Image (tube, grey):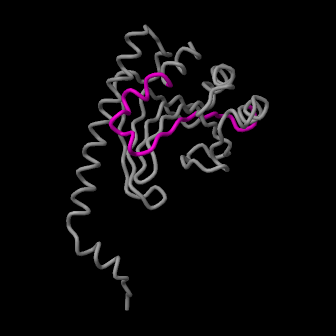
Amino acid sequence: MALFSLQELDIANDPYILLIKNRVMEKVNGLMGELEKEIHQLLQNEGLNLPEEINTLHGKISKGENYKHLPYMMLDYPAYFTKQDIFAFRSMFYWGHFISFTIHLQGKYNDRYGLRLIDEFSETEEVYFCVNSNPWEYIYHPNNYQLITELGKKRMIHHHKENGFIKLSICFPISSLPDAPQLINPFFKEIIQAIL
């Protein structure tokens, strides 16, 4: 027989918890649409032209209920994914944890732009570098992300060469959700200007 704690029974008895959660996720979905517009506008205003194979027409919003047991939603825009080559700017909402913005370069894009990004961001505070050999982790934990200023350029270059990808990321608390369109602007702009 399953044993339920009082807390579990209280939550199971409260329909409003899931209704509020669904409302939050609907608003986050709308926010992802705003972020896509903000990025699109930045690309147009700056006259920045990415390689033609990279999708700059529209983003892809994905969501799920079980990234480390919690809901998430993300926007990949601009993006290009193949088995070997990745260019993706990912905006991610992770329930109870953060909103983050991450540039992921792999394969030919890592070869082409990786060192430029390392040079550009090597002394930038509050930007994280992925030190994991698995590019699909997004938790801000020392075995996955470390602040660039604590790593040093040499370690970043080694990772870039050894693992065939780099990820640079910034994150903000959930309370920053309303400001996300303004928060994305300087980071995305600096990335694009560094690689073009």
Would you say residue 115 sits in the magenta stretch? no
* In the depicted structure, whether residue 96 falls above or below residue 178: below
Name the quadrant of the N terminus: bottom left
Instruction: Specify the farthest residue to the bottom.
Output: 1
In the drawing, does residue 22 fall left or right of residue 55?
left
Please tell me whether residue 162 belongs to the stretch shown in magenta: yes
Number of numbered markers: 0
Residue beneath the point at 35% across and 17% down: 41
Magenta part, dominant SS: helix
Residue 23: percent from the left, percent from the top?
Answer: 23, 50
Which residue occupies 46% across, 11% down? 48
* Residue ID at (69%, 33%): 149
Q: Residue at x 47, y 20 (%)?
A: 53
Q: For this view, does 127 lie left or right of residue 63?
A: right
Q: Closer to the camera, 27 or 49?
A: 27
* Relative side of 161 to 92, left or right: right
Q: Quadrant of residue 169?
A: top right
Kindly indicate the quadrant of the structure image that contains residue 76: top left
Q: Quadrant of the C terminus?
A: top right
- Picture coordinates of residue 128 (x, y %)? 61, 37
Q: Position of residue 167 (x, y in %)?
A: 60, 35
Residue furthest top as drawn:
47
Span shown in magenta: 161-187
**On screen, 111 above or below 170?**
above
Relative to residue 126, is residue 143 drawn left or right? right
Residue 51 x, y percent position in the rendering: 50, 16
Looking at the picture, tell me which residue is in the foreground, 146 or 88. 146
